[in-house]
Each structure stands twice: as C-alpha cells, then as structure tokens.
Amino acid sequence: MAGSQESNASLFSDQTPSQESSQAKRSQNYEEETFYKNCRAAYLAVFKSSLENIKSKEQLCLVLQQAGRNPSQKTVNKYWTLQTTTLNFDDFCFILKQEEPVRKTELLKAFAKIDVNNEGCILHSELYKLLTTRGEKMTHDEVNAITKLVEVNSDGKFDYYKFCKLYMTTNEQCLKNALEKLEVDSKLKRQQFGSQLETSSELATSLISKTIPKTARKTESKPMLKRGHCKTSSQCSSAPSCKASVSSTISMGASSNKHSKLIEANAAKEWQQAQSKGCFFLEESGEIISHKYKLFLSQRSTVCITINPVNLCQMEGKPSPWLVVDTALYILKENETEENIQLVGFTELRNKEVFGWRGELEGGVYWVIPFTTGCRFRKSKKQIRREAKLVHGDGEFTATKEFRAALSEIFEMIDLDGNGFLSLEENNFFEMRTSGEKCDEEAWAICKENFDMKNNELTRQGFMDLNLMEASQQGRDLSSLWMTLRSMGYNKALELTEACPFSIRVYAEKCKPRIQPVCLEAGGEQLKTAICMSVANKGDAKPMDASENIVIYTYKSDTRITSVIGNKVLYEIYITGTALT
C-alpha cells in the first residue's frame, strides 16, 4: 500500500476525534449507570421486584418521593391518565429523566418571594394562608405537620433556610438508605442462590440452565466444555497456514483505488455511520476465530469501512500488546448460494493502526469478515511470574481489584454496539464463547428480576453482580471462573494475551448503514476464497519455471506479503503463505 504522503495524512482523519471522545462516552455511560442504579434502589425501596408494576397514583407518588422528587398532583396526572392502568420500571425511569429533582436554590427562591423583609423566616400565620389557599391546597393538618418540625420552627416562625437544608439532607439520606438496602438485598440473593444450589439439585439445575448457563459446567459430571469444542474440524483459521483448494467462482466488484483518500473529516460529519466492536480469539490449536458481520444498505452509496484494534485495559500502566496487530476486512456480496461469491473489496488503505476501504456499493446485504495474519497475534511464551487472585477475604468472599478490572474489560469487549449495556444477543456471544450454551428469553427475564437492567439490557453493574455471584458460589473452587477468563483470552496473571478486541466503523454517504454481528467462528472457506481471489486480482503474477500452467501470485503492501499458487488447468488456487513486512 505504497500510497502518497498526502493520501495517508488524510486517511481516517475522522478517527481521532472519535477516539478522543471514547473517554467522554465512558463517563456518559457511568452517569447513565449511576442514574439507573439510583432508580432501581428507589423502586425496590417500595416494591419487592423491578418486575412488579405501579398500580395506582398513590404508588406512583410514593416511589417518586423515594427517588427524591416531590411531585404535585398535576405532575402525577401528567403520567397517570384516565387510560393508565399500570406503569412498569422502565416507565418509572423515563419519568425520573423528565422530572428533575428540586434544587436547593429553587426552593430558596420560591420562599424568598414570600419573605418580603428578607429575614429568612415566614410567620406561621402567613404560611397557613399561603399553603391552604394557593396552588395545590394543603389541609390544616398537613401544614401543622410542617410547623411542628422542631428543627425549622421557633417563636411562631418558619425558618425556610433550615427547612431547605433539612429537605435536601433527607432526600440524600433516603437515597443512601435505598442504595444500602439494594446492596444488602443483592448480597442476600447471592447467598440464597448459593444455598439453593447446594441443597437442591433439581432447583440448581433449573436456576443454572435458565439464569446462568455457564455455571452448568459445575454440576455436570461430563468434562468441562473447552474453547473450540463447538467448532467442526472443517472450519479454518482467520490466518490460513496450510494449502486450501478453491474452486468457487469469484468476481471483483465495486472499484476502489488503493491510493485514494478514504474520507475527509468534514465529510464524515455529514455521512451516516454505524459501528460495532468485535474480537479475535486464539484457540488452543493456534486457530484464530472472530466475529463475522452482515452489512445492510438500503440504496447505492459511497461507503467507507474501517477496522482497528482497540485497547480496553481498565488498569493504569497496563498497555495493550495488540495495538500493533495487523487487521483487515473482506467485503463480500451476499448471494443465494456460496458457489458464486462476489468479492467486493478488502481494506488496503492504512493510517497507523487503522485499515480501511472505500468504494461504491449497491443497496443490499454484504458479509464483512475480519482477518489477521496471526504474525503478531500468537500464543505467548512468556512465563507467568505471579498468578492473580480473583477473590480475597474469609467467610464472605469479595472480588479483587484485578478481577473486577478484568470483568469490566470483558464487558467492554462484549458490548458490541458500544451503548454501555448488554442485549440478550450480545450476552449470548459471551455465553457461547465461555460455556457453549445460550440464555433464552425466560432466563433473561429471571436475570432482569435479580440484576440491574435497563430497557431489557444488562447494565455494567448487573453484569459484574452476575459474575461476582458466581464467584461467591464457588467458595475456594475457582476453576469455573478461570475457565471463563481463559475463554475470553486471559492468562493466569489476568493479562489479555489470547484475545485482540477491534472496532469496525461504516460510513455511508446516501443512506443509513447497519452492521450486525452474526456469528463467532473461524473464517472458513469463505475467507480463504476471498484471500486467494484478492491476491490473484491485485497481486503480481509469475509463471513457475517448470510449468507455465502454474502461476505464483504475490500481493505486497507496506504491512504484509501474501502469495498464492494458481493452477490454470485445474482452475484451483492455493494459499502458500502470508507474512508481515
């Protein structure tokens, strides 16, 4: 990819602000999680479960007050109309976002309008008159309850400065109590789950299969499911290392100039975009598997597609070794059969660790297949000096800082759409990777009742609690937890040595693109065929001295060299090798 300096300088120029905004996005996700956790704490202070509905105006008012709001009757009627019969937890969260809590400055400003002498106090007689005749009128008993508060009343006067302070302190204390209760209830549920698993094998089987599929490995007498177990021997690695016979017919389409500019920063702001994360995983055999995607375009458009490795490390001073891993994408047009695969293009353009492709695509469905040579992503031979601890403490085990950081990294890895939450589909990629089983809708509903969710998606805290619950169940036997961590690419030092997370971005000029992760598997014949045909179409051809029918195709870029052998008589092409430059 020996492009001009001008081209390389302008490639992916929109990536830098996106990368710079990642920290702001994480901060936004944290604020969202905190808000949701506060919502859940307030809701469970009134109801036994987040699945229980609000069934009356009185309940709505009570739970809003528990969340630090002081709703008027007008506000309650706004959300509880004549047609309303129930409101659920998600409705409650929506209401809290619409109704901001009253601030101390707003309260003081309202009282100051009555305090004409600016004394900081209001006579009880004036307070009675105001509260029983204006706005939403209070009863005399309700006003008496205020004037009898010792902390804010003296000598027949109501000290509204002290009242505002008391009001805010009470709200903060209510939230604190609700959060503490939520934490205690979560610990109790974890203990109860562990007790149930020990005392009732029938109930254990039900809970395990419906709630936490990966824990089934602990109760079965069969050997634990290992990584790669579900994959057939016919599947090939993302990095082909042996000869592969290819007889499919492939045509190159959607012309792309490898020296052209990919996308300017100004254009990127106007183009519609979609993104998804993914990961390369190293199997025990050295085979590489990754997510595969489908790209959906509603109409013909100029499209730009990029891929780059990302650093998800949550620990300071712990750099990722995979930022130098070479990555690529192969774009294939989906046809009714795989007999006539159309290779549209592959990422030839590069700017540092970002690789990209730009060209015209017709409306339709395309396969997007990630690839790495494996030259810089391979089994580590480094000796582990110290095995990390997952839990510490006596009696009630708690997770270590390192284990929590690893769980947070895993959450980032499997949150494919990057919205800060895990959908059932995203969670099932994780479940299939670590246990070979999926979580169904019924099991997901049980998770929703016991762990933090929002809009039917698991929050980061919910994911942490779910896995920490498993840690508490294990006691001193942490083999299952280690299997989960190893499946996700971690070694015994909790270093991410056998997984390389990446990010894919799609920009379209004339329509809204959509990219969807479909499976997690090796590249297979589909990828081998794409590689062979890309080299045959783009590489230099040289006949062998012994036979003119045998042709060696060599594709060179500034990052790798790939060679294939073509047999003109048999119409076959073989991959002979690929290496980094």
Image: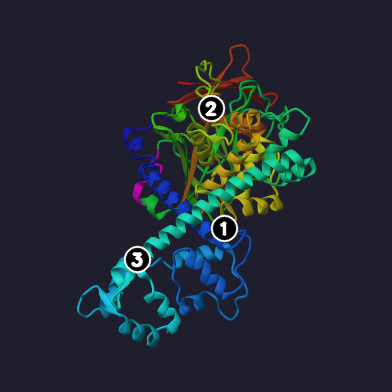
How far across and down, in percent of the image, does residue 577 sit? Answer: 57, 20
Q: Nearer the viewer, residue 369 or 232?
A: 232
Q: Which mark is on residue 389?
A: 2
Q: Which residue is mark 3?
A: 103
Foreground: disc 1 or disc 3: 3
* Residue in view at x 37 percent, y 45 percent: 14
Instruction: Tell me if 177 is positioned left or right of 2 in this view.
Output: right
Element type where label 2 sits in the image: loop
Dot 2 crowding, Cα within 10 Å, few <14, some 14–19, many 20+: some
Question: Where does residue 284 sit, x and y in percent of width and height?
Answer: 64, 23
Q: Which residues are magenta?
A: 260-266
| x then y, percent, for residue 395 | 59, 34
* Amino acid residing under circle 3: Arg
Q: Quadrant of the N terminus?
A: top left
Q: Position of residue 358 (x, y in %)?
A: 46, 43
Query: For the residue labelled by badge 3, is the local secondary structure a helix, a strand or a loop?
Result: loop
Residue 250, compared with residue 153, is above or below; it is above
Q: CA distance from mark 1 to mark 2?
A: 34 Å
Q: Residues within 10 Å of mark 3 (few under 14, many from 20)?
A: few
Q: Earlier in the sequence, mark 2 or mark 3?
A: 3
Question: Residue 458 colored magenta?
Answer: no
Q: How many other residues sit within 10 Å of disc 1, few (<14), some (14-19) or many (≥20)? A: few
Say which residue label 1 marks.
455
Q: Nearer the viewer, residue 450 or 150?
A: 150
Q: Earlier in the sequence, mark 1 or mark 3?
A: 3
Name the mark nearer the viewer: 1 or 2: 2
Asked which colour scheme the image uses, the reply is: rainbow
Asked if residue 41 can be seen in this view, the reply is yes
Q: Amino acid at mark 2?
A: Lys
**Residue at the image point whose x is 78% and y is 40% from the top:** 201
Q: Is residue 322 left or right of residue 156?
A: right
